[in-house]
Amino acid sequence: MNPYQAPLTDMRFLLEQVFDAPNTWAQLPEIAEMVDIDTANAILEEAAKISSELIHPLNRTGDEQGVLHQDNQVITPDGYKAVYEQYSQGGWIGLCGDPEFGGMGMPKMLGILVDEMAYSACNAFTLYGSLTAGAALCINAHGSEALKQAYLPKLYSGEWAGAMDMTEPQAGSDLRNIRTRALPQDDGSYAITGSKIFITGGDHDLTENVIHLVLAKLPDSKGISLFLVPKISVNTDGSLANANGVSVGSIEHKMGLKGSATCVMNFDNAQGFLIGEPNRGLVCMFTMMNYERLAIGIQGLGSAQAAYQMAADYAKERNQGVAAGGSPTGSESDPIIVHGDVRRMLLTIRAMTEAGRALSVFTGQQLDLAKYAQDEVKAKAARYVGLLTPVAKAFLTDRGLDATIMAQQVFGGHGYIRETGIEQLVRDTRIAQIYEGTNGIQAIDFLGRKVTGDNLAALNEFVADLKAQMRAFTHVDAVKVAAVCARLDALVIVAESINEHKVAQPALINACAVDFLDAFGYTLYGFYWLAMVDKVADHEDKVFAEQKAYLAKFYFDKLLPKADYHIAQVRAGDATTMAMPAEFF
Amino acid sequence: MNPYQAPLTDMRFLLEQVFDAPNTWAQLPEIAEMVDIDTANAILEEAAKISSELIHPLNRTGDEQGVLHQDNQVITPDGYKAVYEQYSQGGWIGLCGDPEFGGMGMPKMLGILVDEMAYSACNAFTLYGSLTAGAALCINAHGSEALKQAYLPKLYSGEWAGAMDMTEPQAGSDLRNIRTRALPQDDGSYAITGSKIFITGGDHDLTENVIHLVLAKLPDSKGISLFLVPKISVNTDGSLANANGVSVGSIEHKMGLKGSATCVMNFDNAQGFLIGEPNRGLVCMFTMMNYERLAIGIQGLGSAQAAYQMAADYAKERNQGVAAGGSPTGSESDPIIVHGDVRRMLLTIRAMTEAGRALSVFTGQQLDLAKYAQDEVKAKAARYVGLLTPVAKAFLTDRGLDATIMAQQVFGGHGYIRETGIEQLVRDTRIAQIYEGTNGIQAIDFLGRKVTGDNLAALNEFVADLKAQMRAFTHVDAVKVAAVCARLDALVIVAESINEHKVAQPALINACAVDFLDAFGYTLYGFYWLAMVDKVADHEDKVFAEQKAYLAKFYFDKLLPKADYHIAQVRAGDATTMAMPAEFF
């Protein structure tokens, strides 16, 4: 099997041509100062190299060995620590971090491409750095100046790692019920006591310290506040002091992601520091959550890309049967890529993955604009980030699982045995549909808050924007534009109807949300395929341009129509979903 | 978590009311002699008890321990051997076996319900007996009288086990390439030499002997012949003689099914006996394959049923959030069954599973008629078995995986950790889409051989039959009948079109087969829901009748429309699937 090879041509094409990074960056002085397209391309090339050569070799052994919990310590698989050090020293963890505190200040639309490569190479390893970058983002956005100075440089450098401590046994999707308490201390800090479960990277041996962002309640308060709780306390000069009251209760044994430590964390009068305002912890945590939700979408995308490569390589090498109508080479046995059903699976994975990459770069671009642009450009980008984050998280991860399952099917019986590695991808990527808010929760956030929450203002703005762009395309087929527009209109109509009935039928949003999100996703990918076709016409790599044309045709022929099924589901409403009494289940 | 509880009410309802077993059996003297409906119900009750109390406790530990290969022996997990003995002694392995050789002579439409329960209880354990029953079926159908007398009693009693040795490294879906050779010996036996891979139950410690059905080639022949090759040679009096030249090369480490031994088998001048005619091995093997294909469909169905029960129990016990529009009990937190999205997943699993059970009982009934009826009834049933076997295998297992994935999603984060057991079901059932012919192969068999192979004769006959039955239903909504008829008509139209173009467009069948099978499956389930609604109207258990009514409404509202998407896919043909050159993948 060939090792992972990053799809650099496609990444550059999206960055430069489809989403015009040079022009975007030119308008953002803070970005323009740090990066131009040549630097960006050099970063992509280096990330590709590191992903293939450094990170990917950890993937299989990490799955076989798993994480150990012994003598109250969590030990990562062989090789993780050495690679993590190299990765940190390369500046990859602080890639998009604030330069004031040692980050490299790179734009997110570049960073998510780097993330995708790392996730393709190894899901489990990449989470540690991703959570660290997310924690740093949250501290930078909401922490005091003192906290920023004490913690950010060490997080960006990778010397310390970050973790996100939200879930408790009785409080998963519904965080109102958390019981972890924070008692104010005379020195202005808080004593944190409670237990958290499912804490990714809650402890490990990759770094000398782990910085926990912990949700807890102040005395006599129902509100939730956010606290920074280091595993090892930190002196004012930044050096390490004593162990804090933070310990690992156990680690979970999971379906996959075995190289990633999922910990039960116990806080016993641990010293913590308030981040943001009291009782506003969820708002602060959402800075991290939105970042992580996109990152988890990228996990799904990276898995899909890796799955595609493995399955396509296999399909070109494995001979079974001859092509229907006779072998094209007159051979007694052809590679299975000649078979229509194998092609159907591979084309589906690839057409979905390449459109998914467009969605991820676009969302990254909007994050950059929301952070670095001014006035209305900034405000509009923030609206788009709000609208698209749940879509990117849910749709990229749902299609990520589909992709790994289809790729496994291409391998036949060889896909079920551990040796070929594809079954590991299925197991590793499955969690992405669940954590950081299940995909059901994402869909309810999308339809309930982002679409109908503002009476379709953001959706209408976004749809109008897509239509205006399509009118400006010069290399696309008008019939395909009409096909996308028809679905966009249908989406707006069902969204209007739900908005109208949401008070009288309170279950409507919850019952229809997943189908609405799926319908939106398939429609949006239609738009991205048109955008790619429009921009690829002048591409210097003619094979690349031809591939895009073939994939776009397949997408419009076979995949866009899935939107209609999901729209029909939404139209059918919630009546039959809600009717059966609970005790009949 | 509640242990597995067999859905006995539904099983009896299908057997007695929907498919009228008493009347079917009354017309088949060989069956009528062995069983009546009261005996059948007693068998179902006993099977339910054994599945819950005896087999299910093996499920988790078998996954944790797995199968060992040491000192050239395969060792099953703790408890397997004792339970297998008890299971064998209860007569369950020979349940549908020929009474002349010690089988219990029960009808298949009863046997598949027993199989479903056992698969729900433990996928891995149940395979051993299923392969044994399949091997016995093949020997009984094609073996010489001497082979039958020597082997069948020991197989039916469970003292010996069966295995099916087809695949070689270079010959999976395409068996033409097998290299295992059979040299004729002076005594009329054959010396078998070669290696087979992916042999389920190829060796284990459950029985004193394993009887292999091995595909091999005679000298100077391209044809494939079938041989019976015992692990331990058997004396003419049926006692065990010396070890035959059969050994285990290794066992596979797999995604799941860890309690089931998947072996590399080496045959080194092993003594084998021809089954059936020389060079007609595939035809003989298909007797076993068709049996196994239905059995593997039942594996998918059993997993779906188990997944439903686990997820429904969890959804009624796990509190998170309150119902949209306010808690029905005024509570601060409701069981998650109140949420529309959770209901959507549970209703989908259950509506698909109950229709799937109808498909499986119907297919079992047709197998019985094809075996025990006379003349045209027999011939017609054989045509239906041919038509429906690939559908039952592929559609039940594809929906089986969907079910386990959705059930896992209901568990949220708890679904990803091993403790809750639902992730094991995902891993265990995944193989069912692959082995015994991948679901792609099933679909090509269905559309290419069963539907267009006879110019739609069997399909048209079956469709006319469904329509005639629907006209006779008295308790169903005409709109729903029309909805099923519309899809049946659409299926026939696209099948006619494919049949017309299949020579000019040789890739058409391969490229469209999976969507055609899915469209057929969703449509057929619509018919089964109508059949169930029609017959449940007079059911004495009013809650059961109400549940069926709710599920049928959900099915027509939300699931039947999936057929349209798949029909549209078939209509779109093979152009965009086949266009891209292989090297562009």
Image (spheres, coloured by chain):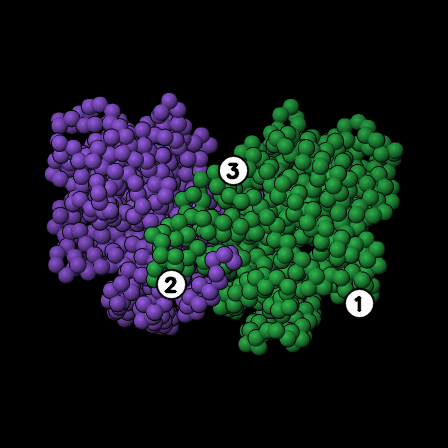
Chain colours: A purple, B green
* Residue at image point 11% right, 38% down: A145
Q: Chain of mark 3?
A: A
* Residue at image point 36% right, 67% down: A505
Circle number at residue A507:
2
* Residue at image point 57% right, 52% down: B305
Report whether mark 2 lies on the same chain as mark 1. no
The kind of residue tagged 3 is Arg
Q: Is residue B126 shown above or below A248?
A: below
Nearer to us in this view, A174 or B191: A174
Residue B88, image x, y percentages: 73, 39
Nearer to us in this view, A330 or A524: A524
* Residue at image point 75% right, 43% down: B91
Report the side of B270 relative to A145 (left or right). Answer: right
Judge depth for marks 3 and 2 and give the one in front. Answer: 2
Judge depth for marks 2 and 1 and give the one in front. Answer: 2
What is the spatial separation of the Cα atoms under label 3 and label 1, in whole angstroms?
Answer: 49 Å
Q: Is residue B59 shown above or below A468?
A: above
First reached walking from the N terminus: tag 3 or tag 2: 3
**Label 2 secondary element:** loop
The kind of residue tagged 1 is Glu
Q: Chain of mark 2?
A: A
C-beta proximity under 8 Å, tags 2 and 1: no
Residue B126, image x, y percentages: 65, 42
The kind of residue tagged 2 is Ala
Residue corresponding to mark 3? A418
Q: Residue A413 lies in what quarter of the image?
A: top right
Q: Is residue A498 visible?
A: no
Residue A210, image x, y percentages: 27, 32
Residue corresponding to mark 1? B376
Q: Few, some or many C-alpha atoms within 10 Å of disc 1 (few <14, some 14-19, many ≥20)?
A: few
